[in-house]
Image: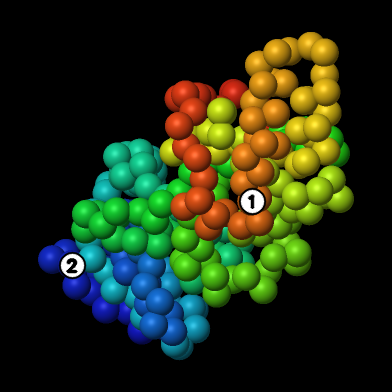
């Protein structure tokens, strides 16, 4: 049974619906979570392992489930924070990891450097993922890489047998970074059509900035124009 401490100025009673902001401490690692529940927050997390510490920082009581849902959505929208956890990748054993943050969102801490990575290959086309320039907050879950699909691209692009992935500087910026396999770039560079694609492919092959992990971000050239992710992008 997890240890649950109420540090809020509101009682964690068993009545009605509530939203909450908590700190989770597991084996010396600290996480934060926004959530909602019916009844006490202590009861919501009591089944977590005994080496888990839950510290309740804020509690907001609500008169109905609908109001708690609305408030939770507002907290998440206002925070607009980084949530890199899902499934077994996260500190909670009994669900709720998708609402967990690796930093104190409401305490004013800044999120780890992160960006959208677009990976082009002849085999898969363009795949999108949320990449971390510093993977420290998920390193302890690295054993899941290759075991569950949502971790396959968590630490870097996946080898598809088309040579190294190279950064494509002319279409990369601080928020969205494009990488492509050597074979894909060579195909673009030799194409007689689409001069823009040919130009950025030739530039990428010339600079040859190898991308083996998302932490290579610090070596990228990020002077490309601002861009947007297509509405129907394929995410992994």
Residue at which label 1 appears: 211
Q: Earlier in the sequence, mark 1 or mark 2?
A: 2
- The answer to whether residue 18 of the structure is visible from this angle is no
Q: How many marks?
A: 2
In the rendered image, residue 26, in percent from the top left (x then y), is placed at 43, 80
- The answer to whether residue 205 of the structure is visible from this angle is yes
Which mark identifies residue 8?
2
Please tell me which residue is depicted at 70% across the width and 13% down the height of the picture: 195
SS state under label 1: loop
Query: In front here: 126 or 76?
Result: 126
Q: Left of 203 or right of it: where is 224?
A: left
Q: Nearer the viewer, mark 1 or mark 2?
A: 1
Q: Left of 204 or right of it: where is 64?
A: left
Compared with 215, 209 (above or below) is above
Compared with 221, 34 (above or below) is below
Compared with 48, 44 (above or below) is above
Please tell me which residue is depicted at 41% across the width and 52% down the height of the picture: 113
In the rendered image, residue 218, in percent from the top left (x then y), is placed at 47, 52
Tell me if mark 1 has few (under 14), some (14-19) or many (20+) residues whose alpha carbon lies within 10 angstroms of its own: many
Query: In front here: 136 or 44?
Result: 136
Q: Tell me which corner region of the image, top left, top right, bottom left or bottom right, holds residue 182.
A: top right
Q: Residue furthest left?
A: 9
Please tell me which residue is depicted at 64% across the width and 51% down the height of the picture: 211
Q: Left of 169 or right of it: where is 234?
A: right
């Amino acid at each position: 049974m997890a240890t649950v401490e109420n540090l809020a100025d509101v009682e964690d009673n068993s009545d009605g619906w509530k939203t909450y902001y908590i700190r989770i401490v597991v084996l010396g690692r600290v996480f934060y979570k926004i959530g909602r529940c019916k009844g006490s927050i202590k009861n919501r997390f009591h089944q977590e392992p005994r080496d888990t510490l839950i510290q309740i920082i804020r509690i907001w009581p609500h008169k109905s489930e609908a109001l708690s849902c609305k408030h939770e959505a507002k907290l998440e929208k206002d925070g607009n924070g980084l949530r890199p956890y899902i499934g077994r990748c996260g500190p909670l054993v009994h669900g709720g990891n998708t609402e967990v943050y690796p930093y104190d969102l409401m305490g004013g801490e800044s999120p780890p450097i992160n960006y959208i990575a677009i990976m082009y290959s002849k085999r898969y086309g363009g795949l999108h993922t949320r990449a971390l320039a510093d993977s420290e907050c998920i390193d302890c879950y690295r054993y899941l890489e290759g075991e569950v699909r949502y971790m396959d691209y968590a630490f870097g692009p996946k080898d598809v047998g088309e040579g190294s992935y190279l950064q494509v500087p002319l279409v990369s910026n601080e928020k969205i970074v494009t990488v492509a396999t050597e074979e894909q770039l060579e195909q673009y560079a030799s194409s007689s059509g689409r001069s823009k694609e040919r130009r950025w492919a030739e530039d990428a092959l010339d600079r040859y900035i190898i991308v083996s992990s998302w932490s290579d971000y610090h070596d990228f050239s990020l002077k490309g124009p601002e861009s947007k992710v297509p509405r129907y992008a394929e995410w992994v």
